[in-house]
Amino acid sequence: MLRINNIKLPLDHSIMDLKREIAKKLAIHTKDIKNIYIRKKSIDARKKNDMIYFIYNIDFEVENEEILLKYDFISKSPNYDYSFPNPGNIPLYSKPIIVGFGPAGMFSALILAEAGYEPIILERGKKIDERKKDVNNFWNNGKLNTESNVQFGEGGAGTFSDGKLNTLIKDKYNRIRKMLNEFVEAGAPEEILYINKPHIGTDKLEIAVKNIRRKIEKLGGTFYFNSKVTDFIIENNKINGVVVNNSEKLYSNVVILAIGHSARDTFKTLFEKGVKITQKPFSIGIRIEHLKETIDKSQYGKYYNHPKLKAADYKLSYRAKNGRAVYTFCMCPGGYVVASASEENMVVTNGMSEFARNNINSNSAILVSISPEDFPSKHPLSGVDFQRIYEKMAFEISNSYYAPVQLFGDFLKQKKSSKFGSVKPTYKPGTRFYDLNKIFPDYISSSLKEGILTMGKKLKVFSDYESLLTGVETRSSSPVRIERNEEYESVNIEGLYPAGEGAGYAGGITSSAVDGIRIAEKIISKYKKGW
């Protein structure tokens, strides 16, 4: 199979048009092209008021491929096959335990299960269907279940998000492709295999997560939900197992920690057991909402409502005068700002979209970089204390899970808003007008103002007076790093494998999944099944 890149076509085209364009470039007949496979599809909207194009990378099949390799723009198609490592020589006499079933736990479990290692997966939250009921009860009635919420439960925090799968990590071992293929097999849209910025959406993601769990079970994996790891059995700097729900002991000399960025109680337990944990930079800020139509118009011009164009996204960044990075994060086209607390009496926001991205508003986090020097102390868990300060302040404004909101123009004037403009809040259970300047220190609020104003010069309407700000966004990433060595084991506890975003080694669904796959590979290449 051969690869040709940068096939450019207008919005209204067909698969046959793709074939014709390839045939034209190669000076062959379309009937000579037997099959084509879209490998990448992106949008070129640089001349949005003139013409918008789709750009394709295509794999195709023809006879006598060697003849066409004379063209410098033709290459052999890359191999997409994922290869499992060869098993190691050390007998593993107990099934590996995986703590957490977010992306890192999910894909480490899948790889281990496919390799015959029959993992045991412990998830503190509930299965997705039960979890959804608890989340909706929180959003609609303000009743928080601290063990079953947006942060905890089957699928992890990413299940209630936009389901973004784009990443900046490099991958030459087809781990990302393995993840994408598994999601598609489990019910995710096939377009995630080739779209430039793939996303699943929370409605499709919950289906895929359940089906991946079922596949792991068929392969010999065992799941325990409502099973919170409350202690770790450590002897002579080696992991020997875990304690579940303060009572049941499960023994294994291999434990993967895929606990997520909000498992604050587990961070504390690990620290008290002597596991090496250090402070880590992260970011905090607010959510900004606009009408989806205004963002679409800004990005697509006169083509903003074209049926082949989906809701527009954006990615913006700025370096503030005080040196802080300000950037958009987890942009949710046609989405919702959602309540994401996991502890009582705290307000936390995040963003979520369904696959169709067809809600009236689009939103994004606007974040400001925070360093350990900003934390209250040198304690390894002080970043958690830093997050809690602002989450608690946001709660105390109304003594409820209602989030503080403000029009951007009023934020600039340091004035509490009194009514909404064209943008109405999507956050539930509710909102309260408040001057967000009173929550954040000046180095955060001034950075937000500078950043949004500058971003408004790049993206029309972004800094409009009526753009709606909702606070606070504190869980963009983990505030700790559970230190590990080159073999992905804890630096001081043998057999303990910190994984994913919660351990400080990933930043989203894809990078967390890939981290979980890497750890599974390390375990497979070290141990052989001994039971």
Image (cartoon, grey):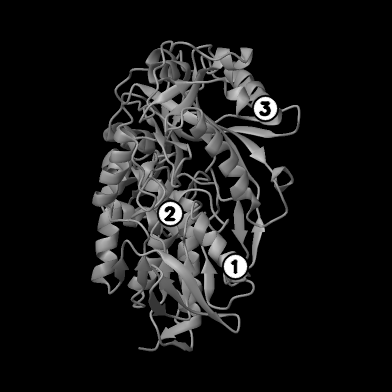
**Disc number at residue 272?**
1
Relative vertical location of residue 417 with respect to residue 310 in this rendering, above or below: above
- Residue appearing at x 42%, y 24% in the figure: 431
Provide residue 432's location: percent of width, then percent of height: 45, 22
Circle 1 residues within 10 Å: few <14, some 14–19, many ≥20: few
The answer for how far apart the CA atoms under marks 1 and 2 are is 51 Å
- Residue appearing at x 61%, y 58% in the figure: 481
SS state under label 3: helix
- Residue appearing at x 31%, y 47% in the figure: 205
Relative vertical location of residue 291 with respect to residue 73 in this rendering, above or below: above
SS state under label 1: helix
Q: Based on the displayed image, in which of its 4 quarters is residue 413 positioned?
A: top right
Type of the residue with mark 2 = Ser
Type of the residue with mark 3 = Ser
SS state under label 2: loop
Provide residue 236's location: percent of width, then percent of height: 60, 84
The answer for how far apart the CA atoms under marks 2 and 3 are is 46 Å
Q: Which residue is identified by label 3?
A: 447
Q: Are marks 1 and 2 in contact (CB under 8 Å)?
A: no
Q: Are marks 3 and 1 in contact (CB under 8 Å)?
A: no
Taking depth in this image into account, of 414 and 484 the one nearest to the observer is: 414
Provide residue 231's location: percent of width, then percent of height: 48, 70
Q: Which residue is identified by label 2?
A: 77
